[in-house]
Amino acid sequence: MPAETEKQPWPFVPFVSVGPLRFGMSRDQVVDQVATTLDAVPSAERVGDWVMFSLPMSFSRPLTTYFSVSGGLACVAIDARHGPQITLGHLRLVGQIPSQLEDEFSDYMSVQGLGAGIRYSQYGDLGTDALGVVLRAQRVGDIVLSRPVFVAQEWADMVWDASEGTIPEEEWRVYC
């Protein structure tokens, strides 16, 4: 697992971008951007009406992207072990102990006046429509770390809900 200092820092701007990836980008734009940024050759497979895109780096998937039916980037999931470090203000969202991150995230939301917008998924993952993010948990060896999932504005309604929200079912099944 890369050390925290080795993880590439990417800022998260709700409903706009996750690092160099901007919501609405075409698949080809995402492939070009990710290949340049992470210096890897991407692979893709179709998942229902979405295209799942991942980067094999030492047999890892540092990130997975999902595209809306219209073809624009709509969702980015960051691997807890191999993904870049996504930041929201002073918060580091990737590879953190979920209970500690939930406390810090809740405090951040309260300071922003958005504390009432926090919900939990059926799997116990904290999420908020207000920012379009779900802080999923992912097993990494013998521990569990945070695997954030970010969505575009059009996917934000009930982002935290595994059965009613728009995040593809495939993403809710990622645990390792």
Image (tube, rainbow, N blue to C red):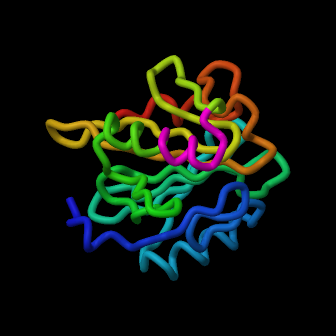
**Of 152 and 73, the residue lying toward us:** 152
- In the picture provided, is 175 more to the left or to the right than 133? left
- Picture mark count: 0
Determine the residue positioned at 39% across, 60% down.
83
Quarter occupied by residue 142: top left
- In the picture provided, is 32 more to the left or to the right than 94? right
Determine the residue positioned at 53% across, 24% down.
120
Q: x%, y% of residue 40?
A: 42, 74
Whether residue 119 is situated above or below residue 151 in the rendered picture: above
Quarter occupied by residue 57: bottom left
**Of 86 and 71, the residue lying toward us:** 86
Q: x%, y% of residue 49?
A: 73, 39
- Residue 113 on the magenta span: yes
Determine the residue positioned at 76% across, 33% down.
157
Whether residue 59 is situated above or below residue 37 in the rendered picture: above
Whether residue 129 is situated above or below residue 22 in the rendered picture: above
Task: Name the magenta segment's main secondary structure.
Answer: helix
Quadrant showing the C terminus:
top left
Q: Would residue 51 be seen by someone viewing this image from the given angle? A: no
- Residue 111 on the magenta span: yes
- In the picture provided, is 119 more to the left or to the right than 55? right
Quarter occupied by residue 33: bottom right
Q: x%, y% of residue 90?
A: 45, 63
Determine the residue positioned at 57% across, 43% down.
109
Residue placed furthest toward the left: 142
Whether residue 144 is situated above or below residue 73 in the rendered picture: above
Residue placed furthest toward the right: 70
Residues drawn in magenta:
106-115
Q: Would residue 175 be seen by someone viewing this image from the given angle? A: yes
Quadrant showing the N terminus:
bottom left
Q: x%, y% of residue 43?
A: 51, 60
- In the picture provided, is 147 more to the left or to the right than 164? left
